[in-house]
Each structure stands twice: as C-alpha cells, then as structure tokens.
Amino acid sequence: MIGLSTAAEVRAAEVRAAEDVLLARTREGALMRRAATGLATVCLRRLGRAHGVRVTVLVGGGNNGGDALFAGAHLAARGARVTAVLLDPGRAHPAGLAALRRAGGRVTGPEGPDGLDRADLVLDGIVGIGGRGGLRPAAAALAERAATGPGLTVAVDVPSGVDADTGAVEGAAFPVLHTVTFGAVKPGLVVGDGRGYAGTVHLVDIGLGPHLAPPRAHQLTDADVAAHLQPPEPGDDKYSRGVVGVVAGSATYPGAAVLCTGAALRTRAGLVRYAGTAGDGVRAAWPEAIVTDGRPADAGRVQAWVAGPGMGTDDDARSVLAEVLATDLPVVVDADALTMAAREPALVRGRDAPTVLTPHDREFERFGVPVDADRVGSARRLAAELGAVVLLKGDATVVAAPDGTAYVNATGTSELATAGTGDVLAGILGALLATGTPAAETAAAAAHLHGRTGQLAAERGPLIAGDLVRRLPETVGRVREPGTGGLRDSEA
C-alpha cells in the first residue's frame, strides 16, 4: 500500500530527518543531495546515456531549485551539456549553483535560454511542493516551450503549477512526461488535474520513512487487492465465500440488473441472489443466480446488498431501498438509490452497518456538498456528514471513510466513460463487501479491480460494459500474479 503524504507532512518529516542527519554529523544538505542523486539516476535510466546529452534545467528559488541544480551538476559530471536557466537569479540556491558551475554547467537568466527547443532533457525545478496558483508569465512561457519541444520533460518533486496536496491547477502549469518525487508520493500527483500533468511518477527514498506521520490517504497496489481475491480453500462453500443480494433493474432498464448481477458472479461471490422486476433477463443471462420476483425480504439470507442500478425512483423503489437500508447488513447505494438517498439522507445517516455510496460528480452534488478542486476533501466531508463510505467516481476515483481515511485509485481508462460500467462496479463492490472486509478498503479494492479490468478490455479497442463482465476472471488472475503490485517506479 502506497501512503500519500501532504506537503506539510513531508516538510515536518524533512525537519526531523535533518535533525537526525546533523546529530549523525553528516554533511549539511544530505537530504537535498540524496534527492538530487535519485533524480539524476532516474533521468539517466530514461535517457540511456549521459555523455553529450543536452540538458536544460529550469530553476526557481528555494530548495526545489537546489534539487534541480545539484541534479544538473551530477549529470554534467557524467558528460552531459547542462544549462541552468535561473528564473530569479537572486534567489537561486547558492550551493547548488556552485556545484553546477564546478561540474562545468552553464548558467543563464530567463531572458534568452538558448537550446531549450533542442534539449534532450528538461528539468522542471521552477516551483516545489509549497507552490500555489499558476505559473507567472515568464515561467509559463518556458514551460510551454519545453512541453512542446522534443526533449524528455521531468518535474522535480511536483510539476510546477500543480497543487501538491489537491492536484488543483489554477492557471498555467508544466505538463511533464515524468515526475520524480522525494520521500513520499504527494496526493496532487495522483488525483485531480495534477494526475494528468505528472506523467509517470517515480518515488525516490531519501530517508524520510521513519519520520513521516502515518498517512491518512493511500493508494492500493495489485498485491493489496489480491488479498481481497483469495481463491477458495478446501473447507469453503458457497456461503463462506460471500452471498450478495442485488436489487437492480426494471422493465425500463433490465440491462442494469444483468450487468450488476454478472459482475458480482464474475468477481467470485459464493452466491448471488437477485430480487427485483427484471428477473426474466437475469435468469436468461445468469442461470447461476437465484432469482426472486419479489421484495428483498423474499430473497433469502445474504451478507451484503447492492441497491440502485436501474431500479427507478418511484414510491415502490423508495420502499424497496428503505427495506434494504433497514437491515443490519452492508449496503452499496448506487445510481437511482443515490438519487433517493439524496432526497432523504436520513435513509443512510446513522446506519450501524457499513454503507458505501458510489456517486459521480453530479450525483454527489445532489447531497448539497459541492465537488471542488480538492476531490479528496470533498469526499471526506460527505462521508463525515452521512457516516458512510463515499466512493467518488472520476478519472482518479476517490474513496473516503467517515473517519477521514481516504484512498485514491490508480487504475482505469477513459474508455470506462460509457453506459453500464457503473453497474459493473456496483456488482464487483457488492461481491467483495459480502466477504466481511472493512468497507473503505474494500471499496478501494473494487475501484482498483474495475479499473484494471477496463484497462485490459480497452487493449482490444473501444469497450462496452459487458466486456468488463467477461474479462473480470482474467483480471482477477492477473492481479493475483506475484510481482504485479507496483503502481509506481521506486528508485533508490
């Protein structure tokens, strides 16, 4: 599991780590040199060589610029032709600047950086994790030239113009191909607009681990999700594997019932019981399911419910939803059930059993809580207000628990933006929730598995929701494979 640490948490850890470095009588600036060495190492691995490589380092003030300058010095010492462009010469890191000059690097001001359009590598050391708002005009112009040029673009810690905590981009920012981040992955690299600016994220260990506060936000790996997908053991039966009940579909939307039920079955639930008005379609598609043409109470014993996809929002549907939420079982509240819960939050608020809401942005805002640039914060606020787990769908789906614990999903594809894929996610989540695992991490695991399946299905071209159901068993097998757990390149 990858911890996501805010800028404040990283700064506090840096202070504690620096104190340890001084107590150990290690030379001053050790953390910066570790970061710069890791940054240079990542760049060299991507370039394949150093000698003769043309490097432009865009340098702002403070420690971020220092990291970039020391990395430039490292590359220059290996034979690269390095030019540092100082956007604010009076604030350039003195020791980093001296190191670059000793190594043979050139230094210029922002007025005329030659070679930027021909650089093989451009390092973005303009603004660090403390930056807020968009880039100033001079920096924005350089970033645009670099981004449209032929060189490999690499951000130092965080792309300039991207909020390290939220991923918000308020104005001009530097879209890069790679980001080398130090000590811990920052939330803004994996959520919001920042995810699209950061490219591939590489984590460099600079020794902050023992000094970091326990993270409140996380990202699951394949290995974490595999723990939720263990194969049956010799003593298992269909009841011990999890029994999920599905209330979905209607005469108008029978496909929602078919997709949700199929996803639950394909996620290896021990048993799926369907209760609703689309029973004929479910029977035809999935003879493995037990179908009841009545109310949820008539379906038999289950261990978790999924309610909402395509069920409608009339009085009958409201009555069925209230019946499900009145149980002491975990419930996934999706689609039409979200609309009804937004009208009557009391249906959800105060339940003793786990409840997972799965809104996209428009459904989320029906609860009267806007989705702002801080998507993790938005999800946390609604989760705390309702006492429920909130799975906020999006390019990077966010899961938040009432206690503030959060997860940001790292899988998925834009091809998932098609009808019915949410019904599939609800079925996956119901199947996993029926095994009795904690709701927030289970919701994050479901989003991860759903996204992985979308990636797999999209390899063959545009996908439809049914493709996800068909490919789920293959995805489960791949997630279980040893060695597939890393979502981030980790560089020493």
Image: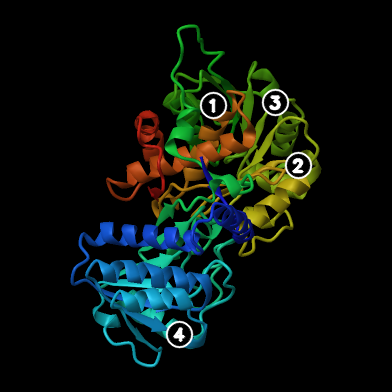
Q: Gap between marks 1 and 2, in whole Å?
A: 33 Å
**Residue contact at pointers 4 and 1, CB within 8 angstroms:** no
Indicate which disc, 1 or 2, sits on the residue closer to the N terminus: 1
Residue 322 in picture, x, y percent from top left: 75, 34
Q: Secondary structure at mark 2?
A: loop
Q: Amino acid at mark 4?
A: Leu
Q: In this rendered view, identify the residue nearer to me: 62 or 377.
A: 62
| Dot 4 crowding, Cα within 10 Å, few <14, some 14–19, many 20+ | many
Q: Which residue is mark 3?
A: 329
Q: Amino acid at mark 2?
A: Gly
Q: Is residue 479 left or right of residue 21?
A: left
Specify the amino acid type for callout 1: Gly
Nearer the observer, 208 or 277: 208
Nearer the viewer's eye, disc 1 or disc 3? Answer: 3
Using the numbered discs, state the Cα–Cα distance from disc 2 to disc 3 in whole angstroms. Answer: 15 Å
- For the residue labelled by badge 3, is the local secondary structure a helix, a strand or a loop? loop
Task: Specify whether residue 295 is in view.
Answer: no
> Going 67% across and 29% down the picture, which residue do you hit?
330
Residue that numbered label 4 is attached to: 87
Is the Cβ of the residue at disc 1 closer than 8 Å to that at disc 3? no
Q: Which residue is mark 2?
A: 387
Q: Are marks 1 and 2 in contact (CB under 8 Å)?
A: no
Residue 84 percent location from the top left of the image: 36, 80
Who comes first in sequence, dot 4 or dot 1? 4
Q: In front of the other: label 1 or label 2?
A: 2
- Which residue lies under the disc numbered 1? 279
Give me the C-alpha separation between circle 1 and circle 3.
23 Å
Q: Earlier in the sequence, mark 3 or mark 4?
A: 4
